[in-house]
Image (spheres, helix red, strand yellow):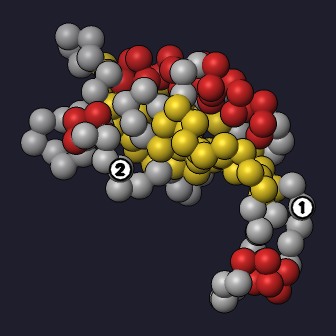
Amino acid sequence: MSDTSQRPAFGSAIYYRDPRAALAWLEKAFGFTTQFVVTTPDGKVCHSEMRFEDGYIMVCGEWPGMPSTSPAAVGGKNTQSVHVQLGRGLDAHCERARAAGATIVREPEDQFYGDRVYAACDPEGHVWSFGETVRQVSREEAEQASGLKIDGWI
């Protein structure tokens, strides 16, 4: 998507104590690209957007009185995570994140549904997972491999 007036139908907002540092870190660790940054008159980042392939993420500062905050402000607790599907190069992506200081909480591993996945925490404790499809798997094959009942399939 090169037209910045068009966004994917779905995105996510992530809140940071230090969004400016988060922007730099997310670029270095995960390869995201900063699209734009909105600052207050005193220079604090209040909103920004980053792109990765055909997706986007909003990186925001904490707002007093709002129910959104960094995991760093609540003892590292997370109620959600962001998943990014890579086209290829998952293992190299993981090593890039590790070299940038990410805490790898789930090493790259092949999954029963045909993806290879890893998960990492950023410096403020947000959990990010990354996947790459390594083989096509039927629903029946996934059910057999996992022992789970799966309704619907991709």
As shown in the figure, which amino acid type bears the numbered disc 1?
Arg
Query: Which amino acid does the dot numbered 2 rest on?
Result: Asn
Q: Position of residue 70 (x, y in %)?
A: 29, 37
Q: Position of residue 138 (x, y in %)?
A: 85, 79
Q: Which residue has dot 1 on it?
A: 135
The residue shown at (47%, 31%) is 122
Q: Is residue 118 shown to the viewer in this render?
A: yes
Q: Quadrant of the C terminus?
A: bottom right
Mark count: 2
Q: Local crowd at mark 1 within 10 Å, few (<14), some, or many (≥20)?
A: few
State whether residue 62 is above or below residue 107: above
Q: Nearest the camera: 44 or 38?
A: 44
The residue wearing badge 2 is 78
Q: Nearer the viewer, residue 119 or 107?
A: 107
Question: CA gap, disc 1 to disc 2?
Answer: 30 Å
Instruction: Identify the residue shown where x is 75% and y is 62%.
Output: 111
Is residue 131 visible to us here? no
Task: Tell me where residue 113 appears, x and y as whole percent.
Answer: 76, 69
Q: Secondary structure at mark 1?
A: loop
Q: Which numbered disc, 1 or 2, marks the residue that appears first in the sequence?
A: 2
Which of the image's four quarters has the N terminus? top right
Q: Is residue 109 above or below residue 30?
A: below
Q: Position of residue 56 (x, y in %)?
A: 56, 41
Residue 146: quarter of image: bottom right
Q: Is residue 109 left or right of residue 46?
A: right
Q: Which mark is residue 50?
A: none
Residue at position x 66%, y 84% from top? Answer: 148
In-front residue for pair 30/77:
77
Q: Is residue 17 left or right of residue 11?
A: left
- Crowd tier of the residue under label 2, counting other residues whose Cα lies within 10 Å: few below 14, some 14–19, many 20 or above: few
